[in-house]
Image: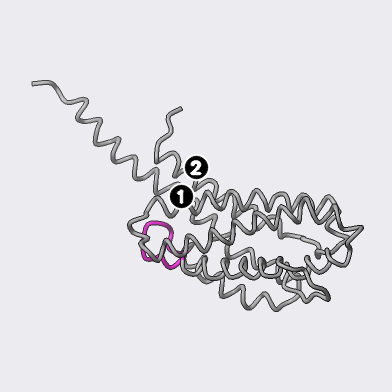
Amino acid sequence: MTITPASLTRAAGAAAAAAGAIFIGVQIGHPQLNATSVVTTNVEVRDTLKVVMAALALVGITGMYLSQVRRNGRLGLLGYLLLSVFYLISLGTSFVAAFVLPSIAETSTRYVNDVTAIATSRSSTGDIGTLHTVFQVQGFGYLAGGLIFGIALYRAGVLARWATVLLAVGGVVTVALSVMPDAFFRLLAFPNGIAMIGLGVSLWRSTRQATVPATASVEPALEAPVR
């Protein structure tokens, strides 16, 4: 199998679409997080999938940025870096949720309840230390990164523009839903998830369309008679 820039870009598109689908899927029917629920198989599987989602999303947005790096410009670089911060932190916090919190839920119940409360924009009764700042940076990366990267992709005009707009406005929707109950909080993933699916599919299709003309232009030359 030959690895080419086109095949890597298509892989990035597939990764982005898969990340968006997982991001939406894990939120459906999600129980409220606390020291009791984090030890259940249901939540542990969801948190493990979130780790996979964050890794796939990093691959996906990297492919989006590099596939049109000149068109994205400095604005695209800024948006890409901010959104990467969100997914990198999400990778870490999801790992903690999946593999650390369940192991201390019985011995440090209050701390786990405080961490899960802050993670879902609820108020806590205790201090969770540096994790509080980590969650704040994560939220900022999601809002600012999605907005700026979405605008940059829209200006580049290569990928599906409806998806770039949805990625950009997803942060605005986040601000409104973050002050609502947990059931509404889970809807935060939907704009970003749908946008990632649309951008991933668009990236895949744009790469295939770009390779077809090149192949077609070579074939006549090969078939031309030698004079």
Q: Image point 42% across, 29% down: which residue?
A: 2
Question: Of 218 and 156, which appears nearest the observer?
Answer: 156
Few, some or many residues within 10 Å of mark 2 (<14, 14–19, 20+): some
Determine whether, in the image, residue 85 is placed left or right of residue 102.
left
The picture quadrant where one finds residue 141 is bottom right
Numbered-mark total: 2
In-image side of 2 versus 46 (left or right):
left
Q: Specify the principal SS of the magenta part.
A: helix
Query: Is residue 101 shown above or below 205?
Result: below
Helix or strand or loop: what does disc 2 sit on?
helix
Expressed as whole percent of the image width and height from the top left, the position of residue 4 reads 40, 36
Given the current orientation, which residue lies at the most extreme right position?
Answer: 106
Which residue position is annotated with label 2?
Answer: 11
Where in the figure is residue 224, as x and y percent of width and height? 16, 26
Q: Looking at the image, which residue is at 55% across and 52% down?
A: 58
Q: Residue 203: say if magenta.
A: no
Magenta-colored span: 149-162
Residue assigned mark 1: 63
